Amino acid sequence: MKKISESQKLAIVIAAAAVTIIAVITAAVLYIKINVNRSVKVADVNGVVSITRNGIPVNPAAGIPLKSGDVISTDAESTIRVCIDGDKWVSFEPDTSAYINYDGTVGNGSTYVNVTNGAVIARLDKSLPIKSVFAVKTPNAVVNARGTVFRTEFSLENDYQNYKDVYVTTVHNIEGTVALQLYDLYSQPVENNMLLLTKTSAQMISCKDITEYLYLNQDYGADDLKYYTLKELIRICSERSISFSLSELNDALFRAAERLLVESSPVQTTVTETEPSEVTTTVTEEETQTETTTEETTTVPKTTTTSSETTTEETSESESETSAPETSPPETAASEEPPQTSASEPETLPVPAPIPPLPADTEMSAVTYFGDVSGIV
């Protein structure tokens, strides 16, 4: 056997040391990357958006950092997008109010998007580390995700499906799989976690009388989505692959824009409806003019009959004129109508009792209820 020279031994030792150093550095980089502090900031703003921090307004400009608990609200034609840790995005649709709670580090932290009204689209480009949590919460549901694209909408309806004061949460899963948990009005879980598959939707309702899934894993198409939802999905589809194609979303967006035009058209028709009212007023003026002319024509024969040939004719005419009002009372049905008037009849009917108010413990708004939901996941 060949003996290893001293120079070769030194080379082997140096190579082993280099490998060890590289491994240590790699582990340190991964550790620092996983345990780095959270980064939550505004990515872009369109329209009028308000951000409040402890009741104090914050300038909603792109790039500003957001603290845990900042409340974000959009108006009827505005949107905002928030970037979390560089690989998670939350898009706020118009007429939406929500706040984001987050803690921990990138590799060991939690993120909760709390929707009190409206809709958000959550996008997770990478799978979460095992110890991390990402969820969208509403007053009656929690949607947990690991690496998906999904939309969550919440509204408080006064009358829905023949129920009163109903919490309604609707989820459209666009890519991947999410877990749903339904809660009643008292933050108690109902049934077990349900999985929502790709390109399916679910709707959950909670009220004083019932708490249930109206539907679960129901198929839907691009035409079932709203205008602003389609716009955001087109942006996402241009950056990563999802279950809808770009052409499919563009076609659906065109049809959604047409529907918006149709919905806005009745406002113009109501303006044209006011025109006939002007015509009817002119008709009544003409009628009043014709009435005055008839009165003038009736006075003419009275002036012409001034001849004093026979007083008996005048008396007969006066009698005929007086006889006319004598015959008018039986001809007028107005005198016979008073006994038929139903105005006096409702007074004899019993007055229905007023609807009693709901108990105080059931009158819970979405905002006040939200504090009880914060720790249910």
Image: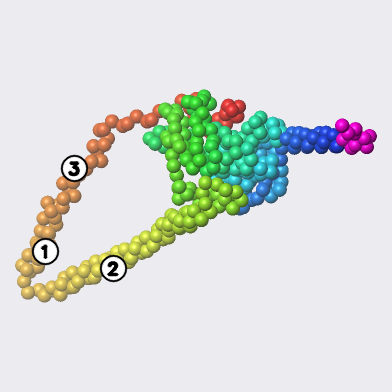
Q: Residue at x 50, y 33 (%)?
A: 195
| 4 in the magenta segment | yes
Residue 150 occupies quadrant: top right
Q: Residue at x 20, y 44 (%)?
A: 338
Q: Position of residue 209 (x, y in %)?
A: 42, 27
Q: Position of residue 293 (x, y in %)?
A: 24, 70
Dominant secondary-structure state across the stretch colored magenta: helix
- Residue picked out by circle 1: 318
Q: Which residues are magenta?
A: 1-13
Amino acid identity at mark 2: Glu
Q: Residue at x 49, y 53 (%)?
A: 248
Query: Dot 3, how many residues are within 10 Å of its Cα: few (below 14), some (14-19), or many (20+)?
Result: few
Q: Quadrant of the C terminus?
A: top right
The tag earlier along the polypeptide, 3 or 2, is 2
Secondary structure beneath dot 2 equals helix
Separation of marks 3 and 2 at Cα, in angstroms:
34 Å
Marks 1 and 2 in Cβ contact (< 8 Å): no
- Residue picked out by circle 3: 340
Residue 31 occupies quadrant: top right
The tag earlier along the polypeptide, 1 or 2, is 2
- Residue picked out by circle 2: 286
